[in-house]
Image (spheres, rainbow, N blue to C red):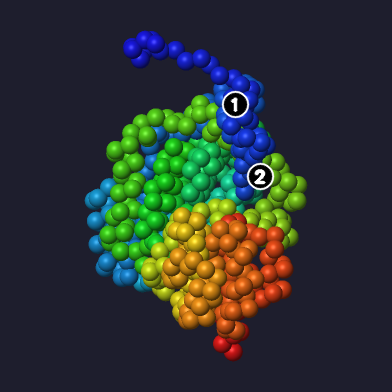
Amino acid sequence: MSKNMKEIQFDTVSYDSWKEHAIKALKGKPFESLFTKTIEGITLEPLYTQEKLFEKLGEQLDKQVSTIRSLREDTTFNVAQQVYAASSEEFLHDLKDSLARGNEVVTIDSRVAFDWDDATLQQVAKYFTEYSFKLIVQGQNDALLRVLDFVENKEVKGLIVSETPVEVDFINVRTVCANTIPFHNEGANAVQELALALALAAQYADEAQDFKTFASKFFVTFAVDTQFFTEIAKLRAFKVLWKAFTSAYGVEEAIAVPTVAETSVRSYSKLDVYVNLLRAGNEALSAAIGGADYFTVHPHDVLTAPTNQSVRIARNASLILKEETHVLRVTDPAGGSYFIESLTADFVKEAWALFLTIQEKGGFRAFEASGELTAMLEETYQARIKAIETRKSSLIGTNIYANPADDLAQETNPVFANVKRVALPFETLRAEYVAAQPKVAILTYGALKDFKPRADFVSGFVNTVGITASQSGALQSVEEAKAWLTSTDATYVVIAATNEDTEMLVPALVGAKPAHMQLDVAGKFAQLPEWQQQGLDGAIFAGQNIVEKLREVLQGMKEVQQ
């Protein structure tokens, strides 16, 4: 082989050839086991190739890529960092500081702890001549909107997010928003968010005097979750869908509309809050690659009370992406990726189909009034919760690799109090366990190398609710195990041993356990029903619903105490 890297040639391997080798490597497992179905119902393949992509999209691939690129006004995004404060004086100070340190958009949520008086609004209005703005308001009568009364320049640029469009006398201020964040916070998946964005757009377009006037005032907002490639594809797919949408209204030229995004709060947790920093960084990068025009990074402690330090860290996450990664110097960083282009096309197809279904049912308002919207979002939310509770999906620091010594914050930011976060079941149950302070132990039998995997699994299992389980040590005989079981003060004990040792231990131990104690085994066993008849309480195993199991254990403890 040549030592010159430029001269090295590698044979092209076909998908069929790769598949053949993969099947051999699976050693009897079906090839289909390599496929993954997402919460959107999209089946992810184990390998994406140029051949497969061309076979799937054909000429549509070039149209998809060119559409996405033509609908970007700029290759970068605007840093829209939100300011948090407990008083108007603190707010004005922090706003000035934020803009001096890299924030590019005056971003304000009207739901603050102080009143919007004229003096404060006059000071805020001064920044609108130099910076664009993003205001989150609660309708036409929101006090924050009075800030525009103090803006003399009618050419200022800004975005106003409201449940229903507000009316302002500024030609460059967009006020018609397809805000998908409330649906996201109720559990919506990417396809549903895209379809609902189009449904809202159709509602507003039909109510407008003409389409171009509507389009000049329109923008869309998305929350970006932790599924990196999914979120990139979601933002890219909207541009393709928007082009199809405008074509349906007879507009053939490319009309770019702002894509405004923020980190997903539903993925944040009050447990191990610094992990939220990592989630935010991941989400910000996917938004940058996906083509967001404005982006807000929520601080890692936004669920409780953000500090100046956490806000600065959040802002710097965006600045690092803009200034250090160079990813935003490329028009479409994901363009041409076999996987992302395929996933983008899947989202376009499925979201358009759902959008048409909503329209057939009478449009967004009728779909919402019928209860079908709520039912759809609840079904998806429950699927998310089940995936988290069974560890099919990971939430680091909450359902896996949890720190039992971590304190659960009691304070709640009222702005995000009603978000259906996936961490909530674990946070709620953890609070109950911390209050009850039960004593949990693991009966470890045999050699360390034999029981350690199961003992570690059980420890991690109960760590999720703030409990550190003690261990018996390496017990070597049934009599020793019985003696330990009758002497421990633990009210919940799990046997961790090999399958063979467990099958030998259970019949001997169920009769020896104290009446106040719950006794489980670690692992799946065909004999479990028989053992339960003999007095065993249950089992802990991979794939089990952690919340349901530990709630059952806690309930059992309460019943014994009564």
Q: Quadrant of the C terminus?
A: bottom right
Q: Amino acid at mark 2?
A: Gly
Question: Where residue 35 sits: x, y (%)?
Answer: 63, 38
Judge the density around disc 2: few (<14), some (14-19), many (≥20) Cα neighbours within 10 Å: few
Instruction: Compare residues 117 and 177 and report the one nearer the observer.
Output: 177
Instruction: Compare residues 483 and 317 and report the one nearer the observer.
Output: 483
Front: mark 2 or 1:
1
Question: Where residue 534 sits: x, y (%)?
Answer: 69, 74
Q: Quadrant of the N terminus?
A: top left
The mark found on residue 41 in the picture is 2
The mark found on residue 21 in the picture is 1
Tell me how many marks there are: 2
Q: Residue at x 33, y 40 (%)?
A: 322
Secondary structure beneath disc 1?
helix
Could you say which quadrant of the image residue 356 lies in? top right
Relative to 65, is 350 on the left or the right? right
In the image, residue 25 sits, relative to residue 178, either above or below, namely: above
Question: Where residue 8 sits: x, y (%)?
Answer: 40, 12
Q: Residue at x 42, y 46 (%)?
A: 282
Q: Residue at x 37, y 43 (%)?
A: 78
- On the question of residue 26 being in view, the answer is yes
N-term mark: 2 or 1: 1
